[in-house]
Image (cartoon, grey):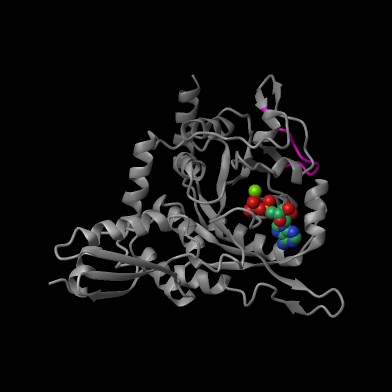
Amino acid sequence: MVTSEKVLQILRDVKDPEIGISIVDLGMVRAVEVQGNTVNVNIALTMPNCPLSATIRKDVTKAVSGMEGVDKVEVELSSMTEKERNQVTRVLSARPSAVQTNVQETWRSRGFGIDRLPKGKIGRVIAVTSGKGGVGKSLVTALLAVELRRHGFSVGILDADLTGSSIAKIFGVRNGPTQTPSGVEPPVSQTGIKLVSMNLLMGRDDAAVIWRGPMINSAIRQLYADLEWGDLDYLLADLPPGTSDAPLTVFQSLPLDGVLIVSSPQDLAVMIVAKAINMAKIMKAPIIGLIENMSHLTCPDCASKIELFGRSKGREASSAANIEFLGSIAVNPLVSKLCDDGKIEEYESLEFASIAERVIEKTRQLKVPQELKHAERAAERESRR
Ligand SMILES: Nc1ncnc2c1ncn2[C@@H]1O[C@H](COP(=O)(O)OP(=O)(O)O)[C@@H](O)[C@H]1O
Ligand SMILES: [Mg+2]
């Protein structure tokens, strides 16, 4: 006879297609009801409108209908509450190895190697990432570069978001890299930030580049290794959102010292952030912390703080994932205007200055042993021959 316990047992083998962990362990199975030969299953999706819901439905139906004595399977889909999602974040944080296997399999199937490029003359390589697009990742990369520059550091930005490069535009840079006697040099912004965006190389602003994994892999490696970046204290890599090929490649091939995660309050699906956090953990890149963008608006009349997307969740999400919450950035029409006009270097903000100071403090603590630096430089010289 079919019982709900037996159904649950079978469902243990059904994995979330993206995370690769059993849907039972993730707490996605809300209810199982057995009426004669009919089984009703309620599955709570981690996100409403989860793009993989059809796959989950199919996998659940297939697993349960294969059971003896089952004639009909009905799968009802619902979505998780915030509390349930926080629980998933905890499960993921506790079990990176399960996710790791899943991601590594993805790589292998795409034919990626895992050799990291040498550090060369670059002090710190920091990646800026997010679970999804449009949360202000490029803005945070740009503001951080500007602040680092104000502290007197030499800074470069590698815009690795090949399908949505916007760094050059934010800085008002239009010229591409130039050939010099010492090599191909990236263009330089008004305040001296070296930067490269894919659209500079393609010669058009709106190039929505559709690239396949291996092409992205080699483009990013070339932008990093073949450009003459010179001596840099910091190289910031603006990653494409999510866990697609390009962030994987960067994580995998750039010698990262740390990762900054940007989220918006609408990522209430803490899950979206959780995926980005997990990817960094898997790559063994230290997470510097989380920055919440567009968390509030300051009333121009009374200067009160309006949380237009509801109570800020950045701090909560950070503590659930056991990472540092670096601070939040307000929505500010001046910011988007300066971005549009290519004048981000004119922007001054106390809230971001203190975030940047914390980043500097934390990345200083990451000590790079001198011997290692020498060894890496020697290896690089060797590889250039
Ligand atoms: N705090 C903010 N205030 C006002 N506009 C913002 C803010 N953050 C981002 N934007 C605007 O939102 C859009 C998306 O930001 P962007 O940094 O390009 O996101 P991402 O790189 O994550 O896709 C841009 O037009 C940017 O100018
Ligand atoms: Mg961007």
Residue 191 counted in the magenta span: yes
Image: 26 above or below 246: below
Left or right: 160 in relation to 92: right
Q: Residue 57 at x, y = what percent? A: 36, 59
**Residue 164 location, x and y as percent?**
64, 43
Q: Residue drawn 76% across and 41% down? A: 192
Locate residue 133 relative to residue 170 in the image: left or right.
left
Residue 251 visible (yes or no): yes
Instruction: Report the magenta stretch's main SS.
Output: loop
- Seen at 61% across and 40% down, the residue is 163
Q: Residue 300's quadrant in the figure?
A: bottom right
Span shown in magenta:
185-193
Residue 369, position in %: x, y? 46, 46
Q: Is residue 199 or residue 64 the one in the foreground?
A: 64
Q: Residue at x 57, y 40 (%)?
A: 122
- Judged left or right of residue 98, residue 313 is right
From this view, report whether residue 381 is shown above or below residue 308.
above
- Furthest residue in direction left, as rendered: 1
